[in-house]
Every structure is written in structure tokens, then in C-alpha cells.
């Protein structure tokens, strides 16, 4: 249980660091959204995703982590990998938006 807590904290901190890098060293705090209705989690989403990825990786990759160094390393790598997956998804969405706007502009000309 102690290793899961350590892995979650390290993965979450990795998520926050990547959040800071992606948003120009600014923490975006959670807030309510009106459209679409819901809650934007901000940096908490990155923390939770990094923590979940590192806990998953530690529990499945390292059966009994006795060396703290390997626990920290796997947690950091898992948190960074989760953030890279989210970044790739975000880039694909932006690419689809740009392609859609280009098609609309061609039709209008």
C-alpha cells in the first residue's frame, strides 16, 4: 500500500509538471463550464491521469518493488507516457479541426 501511495504521488507530480510545461508555467484551476455543461478539472486532471498511470504501471510491471529508485523511475516514466498519449490525442483533434476548416474554405471559394 505504501508503494502505491508513493507511485501515485510521483506520477501526479509528473502530471503537474507536464501541465505547467504545456500551459506556459501557469496552473489552470478547476472551474465550472457553461457550454458544454460540466466541470473543467484543470491541473487536477493531469495530476489524476499521471497518478493513475503510475499506479497501474507499478502494480503490473514491478511485482514487489524493493528498490525505491526503480519505483520512482517507473512512476515518472508512466506519468510522462500518459501525458504524451493525451497530447497526441489533443494534436489529432486540432488537426481534424484545421482540415475541416480548410474544406469549408475550399467550398466557399
Image (spheres, rainbow, N blue to C red):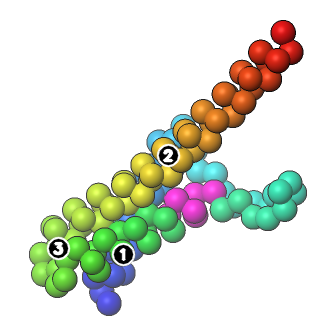
Mark linked to residue 25 = none
Q: Is residue 32 above or below residue 106?
A: below
Mark linked to residue 55 = 1
Q: Is residue 55 above or below residue 76?
A: below
Query: Is residue 74 part of the magenta span, yes or no?
Result: no
Left or right of residue 64: residue 80: right
Q: Is residue 89 above or below residue 77?
A: above
Q: Quadrant of residue 26?
A: top right
Which segment is the magenta one? 42-47
Nearest the viewer among 39 and 81 is 81
Q: Quadrant of the N terminus?
A: bottom left
Helix, strand or loop at label 1? It is helix
Q: CA distance from mark 1 to mark 2?
A: 20 Å
Residue visible at 57% across and 44% down in the picture: 90
Left or right of residue 15: residue 55: left
Residue 103 screen position, x and y as percent: 74, 23
Query: Which secondary structure dominates the residues rendered in magenta?
Result: helix
Q: CA distance from mark 1 to mark 3?
A: 14 Å
CB atoms of marks 1 and 3 within 8 Å: no
The residue identified by callout 2 is 87
Amino acid at each position: 500500500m505504501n508503494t502505491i501511495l508513493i507511485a501515485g504521488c510521483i506520477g501526479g507530480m509528473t502530471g503537474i509538471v507536464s501541465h505547467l510545461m504545456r500551459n506556459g508555467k501557469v496552473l489552470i484551476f478547476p472551474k465550472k463550464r457553461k457550454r458544454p455543461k460540466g466541470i473543467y478539472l484543470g491541473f487536477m486532471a493531469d495530476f489524476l491521469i499521471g497518478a493513475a498511470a503510475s499506479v497501474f504501471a507499478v502494480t503490473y510491471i514491478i511485482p514487489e518493488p524493493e528498490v525505491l529508485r526503480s519505483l520512482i523511475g517507473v512512476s515518472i516514466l508512466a506519468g510522462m507516457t500518459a501525458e504524451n498519449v493525451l497530447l497526441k490525442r489533443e494534436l489529432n483533434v486540432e488537426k481534424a479541426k484545421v482540415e475541416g476548416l480548410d474544406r469549408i474554405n475550399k467550398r466557399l471559394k
